[in-house]
Amino acid sequence: MDYDFVETMGIQMLEGRDFSREFMSDTTDGVIINETMARRFNWEEPLGKKIGIRGPENPPARVVGVMKDFYQKGLYNPIETFMLVLRPNGYFANIRIDGKNQQEMLEQIRQVWQEMYPDRPFEYSFLADNFDEQFRADEKRAQIFTLFSLLIILIASIGLFGLASFTVEQRTREIGIRKVMGASSSVIVRLIGKEFLWLILISMAIGFPVAWYFMDRWLENYAYPADLSPWIFAGTACLAMVVTVLTVGNSTLRAARTNPANVLRME
């Protein structure tokens, strides 16, 4: 890496300075460390501290700056101690290009490369693609979970609709008698729907703690896991209630609006 690496990569400096051509000593003993390394050595004032990086036979390096921590190996791994050492004559070049004219810029870079190294192939990769590769497995897993969640909701809705229809059919005579006795459709819907809502509440009381446990265990795989929000489960509960009301209410309301005389005549 050279003098423009920090600026090109958008690394934030917290203390000290970046490498500079005005300080020739940077090429021999200057290093920039991250926050984690400063904390690891318990350095409250890390600037000017010495670090041995080239073996005991060589003089130690000197800290000229402290950069803000950033993830180096994805979110599954904690931020490690990290330092930048000036090596202007490296074998890789990091180039920031305009996202609107990528193809034009790449073609210009390709031409310059071929002029300088006509016998070597031009190979490149985007830093964003390298980061995306780290999280691609999580994205695929999230897509699979989303698909299966939708299928589970669909199957549960179909099963709930079938159970509601069966329950209403078994209680057709009761519904007819209640209608004759003056019960309104809303009263009948609440009477039958209440039983299903209790079933949903019991299932959530069992399922939510289990889901919380496994989700918390999964998040522990990350070095810096996010906290589980109770609003996720609150939203799930509201969705379950809405699906129950729409599914059960449709079957119950249709039976409650049936003429009780026809129902009792069939009985």
Image (spheres, rainbow, N blue to C red):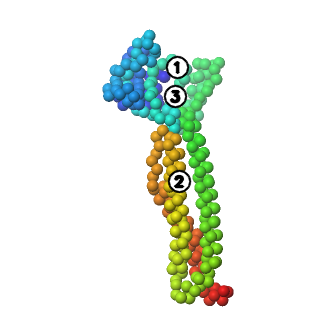
Of tags 1 and 2, which is closer to the observer? 2
Q: Which residue is mark 2?
A: 211
Residue at the location (50% across, 55% down)? 209
Looking at the image, the residue that sits furthest to the left is 45
Viewer-proximal residue among 220 and 59:
220
Q: Is residue 160 above or below residue 49?
A: below
Classify 93 as above or below 235.
Answer: above
Confirm whether residue 16 shows in the render. Answer: no
Q: Mark 1 highlights which residue?
A: 90
Whole-percent x, y for residue 18 in the image? 39, 25
Amino acid tagged 3: Ile
Q: Quadrant of residue 25?
A: top left
The residue depicted at 50 percent of the width and 40 percent of the height is: 222
Asked if residue 65 lies left or right of residue 122, the reply is: left
For marks 3 and 1, give the one nearer the viewer: 1
Give the amino acid type for the residue marked by disc 1 in the picture. Answer: Gly
For label 3, the SS is loop
Disc 3 to disc 1, C-alpha distance: 14 Å
Q: Of callouts 3 and 1, which one flags the residue occurring earlier in the amino acid sequence?
A: 1
Q: Amino acid at mark 2?
A: Ala
Residue found 51% across the figure and 38% down from its top: 76
- From the top left corner, tell me how far across and down residue 89 is, in percent: 51, 17
Check disc 3 and report the residue beneath it.
95
Q: Is residue 64 visible?
A: yes
